[in-house]
Image (cartoon, rainbow, N blue to C red):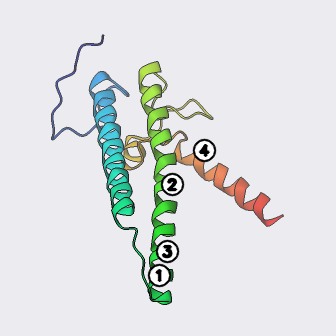
């Protein structure tokens, strides 16, 4: 078991400290776990609402509107389910020591990028190259 790093609520990683030191790893682990907990709590709320919200609405337009709302909610939950799996993958990378490094180049991913998108697996430059390739192939 790893010794627990004292967590400072006001702490934000900076470029003038060693990259992916225990304090930074702890910061990102906590950020990822809080994000995951938030998504799971929202999902539970959606399930409860859908289970109690089933009702017979006589007006066709109102019923269609409610079904559209449900479909949108389910699509949102599906996207969030995918985010949860990416969060789990990021947590595994923290444990195996590869978190914060670009999967394509092996270079460090900027702290600002990780802070904004803690599930990032590519540096900004590699992500931009990837998106350019996607655009080119999509246009074919």
Distance from Cα at disc 1 to Cα at disc 4? 46 Å
Q: Which residue is drawn at 34% across and 50% down?
A: 44
Check residue 117 in the rendering and tell me which mark sits there, or answer none: none
Q: Report the label total.
A: 4
**Residue at the spot of label 3:** 67
- Mark 2 is surrounded, within 10 Å at the Cα level, by few (under 14), some (14 to 19) or many (20 or more) other residues, namely few
Q: Can you identify the residue that label 2 sits on?
A: 79
Asked if residue 32 lies left or right of residue 12, the reply is right
Residue sitting farthest toward the top:
1
Q: Position of residue 111 (x, y in %)?
A: 38, 40
Whether residues under marks 3 and 1 lie with C-beta atoms below 8 angstroms apart, the answer is yes
Q: Where is residue 134 in the image (x, y as percent from the top left)?
A: 71, 56
Q: Do the CB atoms of the residues marked 4 and 3 lie less than 8 Å apart? A: no
Q: Where is residue 1 in the image (x, y as percent from the top left)?
A: 30, 10
Whether the residues at callouts 1 and 2 have beta carbons within 8 Å, the answer is: no
Q: How crowded is mark 4: few (under 14 residues within 10 Å), some or many (20 or more)?
A: some
Q: Earlier in the sequence, mark 2 or mark 4?
A: 2
Left or right position of 80 against 7: right
> Looking at the image, is mark 2 or mark 3 nearer the viewer?
3
- Label 2, secondary structure: give it: helix
State whether residue 100 appears in this view: no
User: In what element is the residue under mark 4?
Assistant: helix
Mark 2 → mark 3, Cα distance in angstroms: 18 Å
In the image, residue 49 above or below residue 20: below
């Amino acid at each position: 078991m790893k010794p627990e790093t004292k967590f400072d609520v006001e702490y934000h990683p900076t470029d003038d400290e060693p990259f992916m030191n225990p304090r930074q790893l702890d910061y990102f682990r906590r950020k990822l776990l809080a994000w995951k907990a938030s998504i799971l709590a929202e999902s539970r709320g959606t399930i409860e609402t859908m289970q109690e919200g089933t009702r017979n609405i006589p007006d066709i337009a109102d019923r269609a509107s409610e079904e559209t709302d449900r479909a949108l909610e389910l699509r949102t939950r599906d996207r969030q389910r995918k985010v949860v799996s990416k969060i789990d993958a990021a947590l595994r990378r923290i444990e195996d020591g590869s978190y914060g490094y670009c999967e394509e180049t092996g270079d460090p991913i900027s702290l600002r990028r990780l802070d904004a998108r803690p599930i990032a697996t590519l540096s900004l430059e590699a992500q931009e190259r990837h998106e350019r390739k996607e655009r080119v192939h999509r246009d074919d």
